[in-house]
Image (cartoon, rainbow, N blue to C red):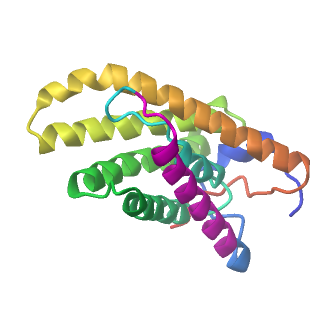
Amino acid sequence: MPGASADDDAQGAGTGSGALAGVQRATAIAILAALSIVIAVLEATTLPGIPLPGVKYGLGNIPLLFGIGLVGFGDLVAIALLRIGIAGLLTGGLNVMNLALSIGGTAAALGVVGLAGRARARALGPRAPLFTLATIGTLMAAAHVTAQIALASVILHAPAVFSYLPVAGTASALTGFVGGALAELVRKRLAARGMYSHDSKAGNES
């Protein structure tokens, strides 16, 4: 694929159709989904847990972030759902409660992608710093844990759970920033070698 400006990579989330089509698109989805699942399983089975309930490294989101602008928004949703289901089955963590929290948190996180793209398209320039992958990763992680805490408070009938939000939100935002920064670094390296290209209006295909 021809090279593209890596600085524009994170700017186009949620604003148009994916850059890839046909076999290339299907291949990209398969690779991103496989990477996301493998990384999530390795994170769950090999890394020491973060000593904060509900807070994870979120490394499985790196391929998802990498896919912003490369595949459509609907494709990102499919990748995320595949990761939740398959990684959950492989690690033995797929139960009703975990499934509800995972889907709720992921829906909120992906909502950030869609809203970011719409805001960029309507009000901001294509190089607005709000839409670097590091920032999107931060916002996605914060939205994810906020939605999970909200769902947990409803399911458990325990509004006091919200008192944990400042701690969990801060920790999750930090891990989200690191994941986004890593995804952005990889995209820039690949773009510099002419191995990555995308449509700056990608990310909102359903």
Residue 57, image x, y percentages: 50, 36
Who's the residue at 42% across and 22% down the image? Answer: 170
Position of 9 with respect to 180 (left or right) is right
The residue range painted magenta reads: 25-50
Closer to us: 34 or 26: 34
Can residue 146 be seen by looking at this rendering? yes
Residue 117, image x, y percentages: 56, 47
On screen, 183 above or below 159? Answer: below
Q: Residue furthest left?
A: 157
Who's the residue at 65% across and 50% down the image? Answer: 66
Question: Is residue 31 inside the magenta stretch?
Answer: yes
Who's the residue at 80% across and 57% down the image? Answer: 197
Query: Considering the image in quadrants, where does the N terminus appear?
Result: bottom right
Q: Main secondary structure of the magenta part?
A: helix
Please identify the quarter of the rendering in which residue 87 is found.
bottom left
Who's the residue at 47% across and 58% down the image? Answer: 80
Residue 83, image x, y percentages: 47, 59
On screen, 32 above or below 181? Answer: below
Residue 118, image x, y percentages: 53, 47
Closer to us: 57 or 109: 57
Position of 158 with respect to 146 (left or right) is left
Closer to us: 152 or 52: 52
